[in-house]
Image (cartoon, coloured by chain):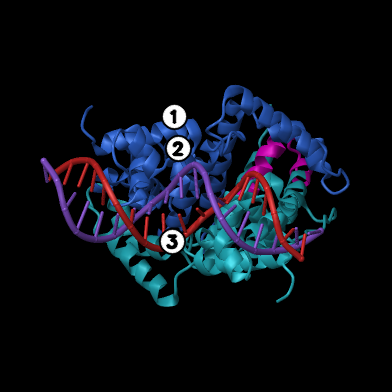
Chain colours: A blue, B cyan, C purple, D red
Amino acid sequence: MGKLTREAVVGQALEIGDAEGLGGVTIRRLAQELGVTPMALYWHFKNKEQLVVGMADHLIQGFVIEEDFSAPWREQLHELVTGLVRVLRRHPCAVQVVDEVDQMAVPSFLRVWDTALGLAKRAGFDYEESCLISRYLLQGAIALAGGPMRRRCPGLSEGEAAERLRVKRLTLQSLPPDVYPHIVEMAVPLAEGADAGLYDTFGVDLLIGGIEAMAARPHR
Amino acid sequence: MGKLTREAVVGQALEIGDAEGLGGVTIRRLAQELGVTPMALYWHFKNKEQLVVGMADHLIQGFVIEEDFSAPWREQLHELVTGLVRVLRRHPCAVQVVDEVDQMAVPSFLRVWDTALGLAKRAGFDYEESCLISRYLLQGAIALAGGPMRRRCPGLSEGEAAERLRVKRLTLQSLPPDVYPHIVEMAVPLAEGADAGLYDTFGVDLLIGGIEAMAARPHR
DNA sequence: ACCTGAACACCGTTCAAGT
DNA sequence: ACCTGAACACCGTTCAAGT
């Protein structure tokens, strides 16, 4: 039995989170799977919140965009968003983790944020606006990574997922059509979610498009 | 002691949630404050999840946008988003509730969604795109209502909030400037969050702007 | 129909103690 | 420095039973 390190704990936590959702990540459960007492974890992490911060940091680690000052800012922003989405997609529980955590406490997230801020400034936005823009972008990327309706459900098998989807579709279809006409009509695409490729490109274009529109209009 | 009704339970739950955050809303706590056994609540709600669904439904209840077919769709969309943001702002815990709940299980949320879907169709988007657009809009509105950094912290007094803000600012300012140059530089606006008015109008314009950009470009 | 009592299987965390 | 044991104050939920 190897030593109990911060990385070992975070790794195991991510494994549980990916398999069963963040709800399954528990100090006691974690300790059990690591062959150790629950209280052992408290030497490595101040509390559970810090454990989740560790998970989030590990997740985003290794995503670095080099600031290429020759490329136009819109392309850089595009790359930033698509890159972040791709990184978050690598772990099923990533969005759940990043959503719950205090993002300002996650170093690797702050790095991404810093880059976004720089790009917003370069695009000509002032201080306050750059803050909004950057938050908007990162939040948007996370929402995109939550992706085509596959949200909030790590922790169920192949067949279970298909069954769940069928139930969701039927639920929507059996809604009263006079009060939810469009939802009933579009029950199929709503339940299934869009094609992943379309979803991503469309979503990113939407985000960047909104920002470009703001950049183009006259500031007071 | 009046009777224990669904509404009484939801009302008390919202009161706790507004004062201390959704984390304070507990079956046992709720029962205690209502002068009743925890198990009494299980006659009125199948489980805690359904309680939260009830909270969410109550929150969005009463927000209805009449479909005005004479107005252009962009104005209607604008009104939809600003209206939703305003409704969510009425309760400090609203965003937390709506974020956690399975939105498809909340009737009043489905009504808003249905309206958004109809407007997207009217704007000329096809089925799949309308699904994306509508999700994007509602998710965006919720994120906006989470607002200028006031996120995730119902449940602390006036002074505590000010202190927390000061700490946050200092934390950001004392970050290593060589690795987080822009964050350190913009620590003040980042920590304080933007002016609420600017935040909302800017955010809504960003959302609608992105959609208009997509509507204007040629579809394949 | 509406609520209680007792019990089950969980949580996070603290604090003193061991090696 | 690194981990354990015992205890505290919580959770959600089930199930049989009361009125």
> Dot 2 lies on which element?
helix
Q: Which residues are magenta?
A: B118-139
Q: Which mark is residue A90?
A: 1
Measured Cα–Cα span from mark 1 to mark 3: 33 Å
Estimate the x, y position of residue A6 in percent, counting from the top left: 26, 39
Choose top left, top right, bottom left or bottom right for residue A159. top right
> Dot 1 lies on which element?
loop
Estimate the x, y position of residue A43 in percent, counting from the top left: 23, 47
Same chain for the residues under marks 3 and 2 in the image: yes
Q: Is residue A191 left or right of residue C7?
A: right
Name the residue nearer the viewer: B77 or A42.
A42
Q: Chain of mark 3?
A: A
Neighbour tally class for label 2: few under 14, some 14-19, many 20 plus, Cα within 10 Å: many
Q: Residue at x 34, y 45 (%)?
A: A51
**What residue did someone put label 3 on?**
A128
Mark 1 and mark 2 in contact (Cβ < 8 Å)? yes
Estimate the x, y position of residue A137 in percent, counting from the top left: 48, 46
A139 over A84 or under it: above or below: below
Q: For the N terminus of chain B, which image quadrant?
A: bottom right
Name the residue nearer the viewer: A2 or B201.
A2
Q: Amino acid at mark 2?
A: Ala
Q: For the C terminus of chain B, which image quadrant?
A: top right
**What residue did someone put label 2 on?**
A94
Q: Residue at x 39, y 39 (%)?
A: A29
On whether residue B130 falls in the magenta region, the answer is: yes
Measured Cα–Cα span from mark 2 to mark 1: 8 Å
Q: Amino acid at mark 3?
A: Glu
Q: Residue at x 56, y 61 (%)?
A: B28
- Considering only order in the chain, which callout, 3 or 1, is on the residue closer to the N terminus? 1
Same chain for the residues under marks 2 and 1 in the image: yes
